[in-house]
């Protein structure tokens, strides 16, 4: 608890849950755009974004954006590692956020 209280003061924000919400929104907007960008590049047969990058961004909290991008752009939906892995990472993201918010 002392660490969390210290972070609140150090960050200059009195509301750590708000910081988490802003981060989560930003990383998911980025991951959604990343999925759209890769679909655009795929259609034009250009250099693609690596699958590893999608998983890294998802693990950083952007799994929801990737899932939404997969659905919206119909992209990477045939890859088992994506249609099984990314939603699983999303559940881990939700659990982590809930645990952090519970500590605050």
Image (tube, rainbow, N blue to C red):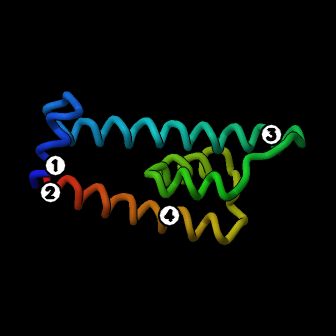
Asked if residue 58 is positioned above or below residue 35 in the image, the reply reads: below
Q: Quadrant of the N terminus?
A: bottom left
Between circles 4 and 2, the one closer to the viewer is 2
Between circles 4 and 1, the one closer to the viewer is 1
Q: Which residue is mark 3?
A: 41
Of 15 and 10, which appears nearest the observer?
10
Residue 9 pos. (x, y %): 14, 34
Mark 4 → mark 3, Cα distance in angstroms: 23 Å
Circle nearer the N terminus (4, 3): 3
Asked if residue 9 is positioned above or below residue 93 in the image, the reply reads: above
Circle nearer the N terminus (4, 1): 1
Of 60 and 32, which appears nearest the observer?
60
Q: Quadrant of residue 7?
A: top left
Q: Which mark identifies residue 4?
A: 1
The residue most toward the right is 45
Q: Which residue is mark 4?
A: 87
Confirm or deny contact between disc 4 and disc 3 (CB under 8 A): no
Residue pictured at 50% horizontal, 64% vertical: 87
In the picture, measured across the screen, residue 86 lies left or right of residue 16, that is right
Mark 4 burial class by Cα count in 10 Å: few <14, some 14-19, many 20+: some
Mark 2 → mark 1, Cα distance in angstroms: 8 Å
Mark 2 → mark 3, Cα distance in angstroms: 42 Å
Of 1 and 27, which appears nearest the observer?
1
Q: Quadrant of residue 77?
A: bottom right
């Amino acid at each position: 608890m002392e660490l969390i209280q210290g972070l609140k003061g150090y960050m200059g924000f009195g509301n750590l849950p708000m910081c988490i919400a802003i981060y989560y929104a930003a990383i998911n907007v980025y991951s959604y755009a990343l999925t759209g960008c890769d679909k655009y590049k795929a259609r034009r047969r250009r250099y693609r974004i690596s699958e590893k990058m999608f998983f890294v961004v998802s693990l950083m909290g952007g799994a929801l954006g990737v899932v939404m991008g997969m659905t919206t752009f119909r992209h990477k939906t045939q890859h088992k590692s994506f249609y099984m892995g990314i939603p699983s990472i999303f559940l881990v993201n939700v659990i982590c956020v809930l645990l952090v918010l519970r500590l605050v």
